[in-house]
Image (cartoon, rainbow, N blue to C red):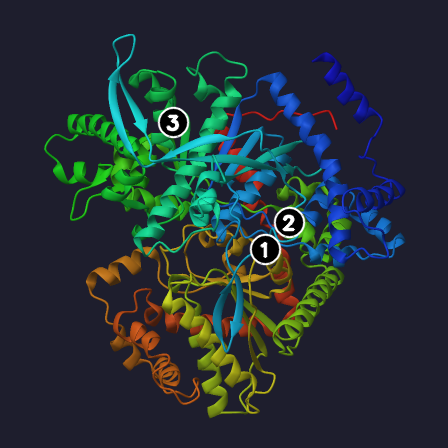
Amino acid sequence: MESCQTTFSEAVGDQIRIGNTVDEIKCDVIENLFCLQGKFPEVATKNDYYLAVSYTVRDRLLHRWISSAQAYYTKKCRTVIYLSAEFLMGPQLAKNLVNLGIYEKTREALDQLGLSLDDLIEQEPEPGLGNGGLGRLAACYMDSLATLEVPAIGYGTRYEFGIFDQEIRDGWQVEMSDRWLRFGYPWEIARPEIALEVKLGGHTEAYTDDDGCYRVRWVPDRVVLGTPCDIPVLGFGVNTANLLRLWKAEAPQSFDFQAFNVGDYYRAVNQKIFSENITKVLYPNDEPAAGKELRLEQQYFSVSCSLQDMIRIYLQREKSLDKFHEKYAIQLNDTHPAIAVAELMRLLLDEHGMEWEKAWHVTSNTFAYTNHTLLPEALEKWPLPLFRQVLPRHLEIIFEINRRFLDTVRGKYAGDEDKIRNLSLIEEGGAKQVRMANLACVGSKAINGVAALHTELLKETVLKEFYELWPEKFSNKTNGVTPRRFLMLSNPGLTRLLTEKIGDAWTRNLDELRQLEKFADDVGFRAEWHRVKLENKKFLSKIIFERVGVRVDPESMFDIHVKRLHEYKRQHLNILHILTLYNRLKRNPGIETIPRTFIFGGKAAPGYFLAKLIIKLIHSVAEVVNNDPAVGDRLKVVFFPDFNVKNGQRIYPAADLSEQISTAGKEASGTGNMKFSLNGALTIGTLDGANVEIREEVGPENFFLFGMTADQVERRQRDGYRPWDLVELDSELHDALDLIGSGALSGGDPGLFQPLVRSIRDKDEYMLCADYPSYIACQEQVSLAYKDRDHWTRMSILNVARMGKFSSDRAILQYCRDIWKVEPVENRGR
């Protein structure tokens, strides 16, 4: 072992493949082109060069990764485990260049080779291993964990096809396969030597072991193998690189020769296909029963592989699992991995012979649970028959956890059957279901929300009974975003301006941005700030023309609404405002108005009809508004297709106004609101999610607030909400809805948008009609403020200066202190 360590140290000392001069980088790129791509420059493609540069960068990551792992192993570090169904990591090349500090040197090296770094960065595919905020938060947290030198492993699933690529045809969303692996993915290292068995289906058998103890054996219908692919996650400006381990499913035997030899060619490969389907696609449609079953299998597969892997690593040094909880702090990122509570119990009980009380002590002190939703329908539940079919042993364990838990509850709340019913892990009404949020609460030592308002609403609504039972378990951990990707990388012009004025300490401590406040009244600095914003808008304008063929004026206000398409996020309220402005211009063409460019972006779930209809409506409004001579350049409407991390990095820096207009009490936190503000956009929004805290930090005078509070929303719904009455009382709202339903926006087809019009007039679940007057009035205040460009710029500066709280570094430090009890470990090696 000593000789191996010496060899590693000598390799690092000799700077093998880790030199950071321009010449060393250039030489390594050419060597990788020859040795890894098998190409010479005259025939090399852009993708060949992208891969050669990426492997050059990866070499520099691997030394840090190996030395980090060695440091953790030597020091027996307590380790954070982030369990998540999604890791939306985004493109890696540019991010790793920034974190290594060799971005400009690499650009120079490539310039000397006649290559463009920007072109190669653009060449990189984006793995769509997440649906939106949940996966992007996991990625930000992985960045911060490494930057803060906290030992950590992220565990998830290596979906062969991630979230769909979005194309727009005739205004409709069309889902295309996310083929992110098509040309190879240089940032991962496959570990085929690690192959863990995952059981599915079958039945259980009770028996007595040699010591006379009651035991259970799970006899599965089938077994799938899980093998990992590892991605190093490098911190910024440090030598620490943590591990992201993603699991892919394989068959124990991928080819059946006996079936092939008798001509049954389908059966010969059927096991391989059946097994690999588990990690084939992110979030299969779970409307049909087969989709539900596959999704449950996906969640269990990832969790089982991850826990088995942790135990495997732990037992390399320890003889017993009694102190497993002292080694690992496992964070459940929402309910998707909540089956981990039952799986760890199964592994401890059935595979390692532990007694129930000790196993429960270990389990309940290992996990912590982050809740990300206030929507009851988003709290996962699984029908009992399906759960029994896929995971028969786990259902038995959950029943036993529930029996013991409810005995405790009855001891405290004797006779309160409503409370017992609400706390139970099994929903008894109608078709019985397993409640995954309840399982996560019972099996975790800590429970947290992701914004101050969200946490308070959790205590009052969906987790009320658990808060009353265990108030000490609950805390708030407001989300954050990494400034490395969403400012340094996304907005190099603003990054340079900030660093020139206040130095670069803000890159590691975002609170340092407070120093900008003293420049807010500096006329020259405001002019520079405005120049940077205008350049970002010009850049986005060019991309918009290339992508959708619409010319927009960079001098107009860029009013941007990009996020997942969902009715509670109220993109259709924004459309009602646009149509109100359009109707005003049509009635009075001479009216004075601030030119605005409305930019939308976001994906709708494939089976979500109304969300997809809203996308069609946006395009139909754009077709009419953008081509009406009476409007000219005063209004433009754009839908930016295929919104993802890469496109977000282009959009956030160009925004003047950020639309954060969800119905109060529906958004848990949001992180897009933080990314926009960090790049100098002003926010128009409700008191929802993290908007509340953003407004507190930037100051009410620098935030455009409208709409009802969460309490007012709840009260109005309780008292009986009649949207039709509000439509009849407000002529502009009435006219906007009539325009949608008239056929004027749909080529004369009045029926196309009727489902959307009816949903607003008849039910209006997300209360657009109630908030419409306040929203329109607030937008008028926005227009007045934008007229004074100098004052608007001052507000923009103060928004950025006061965003320190919303760094993911701050959030991770709070998790480390309050929940995980983990200390940083410095890695001195390279």
Q: Earlier in the sequence, mark 3 or mark 2?
A: 3
* Residue pointed to by mark 2: 485
- Discs 1, 2 touching: Cβ within 8 Å: yes
Kindly state the secondary structure of the residue where label 3 is placed.
helix
Horizontal placement of 333 versus 600: left or right? left
Which label sits on residue 645? Answer: 1
Q: Mark 3 or 1, which is nearer the eye?
A: 3
Residue found farthest to the front: 262
Q: At label 1, which amino acid type do we have? A: Val
Give coordinates of residue 807: x percent, y percent: 57, 44
Of the 4 image quadrants, the one containing the C terminus is top right
Q: Earlier in the sequence, mark 1 or mark 2?
A: 2
Horizontal placement of 26 versus 806: left or right? right
Give coordinates of residue 88: x percent, y percent: 54, 48
* Residue pointed to by mark 3: 344
Looking at this view, is 38 or 710 the one in front?
Answer: 38
Identify the residue shown where x is 87% and y is 40%: 24
Looking at this view, is 415 or 135 the one in front?
Answer: 135
Kindly state the secondary structure of the residue where label 1 is placed.
helix
**In the figure, residue 657 lies in which quadrant?**
bottom right
Give above or below for 108 relative to 247. below
Residue found farthest to the top: 211
Tally the marks: 3
Identify the residue shown where x is 72% and y is 54%: 121
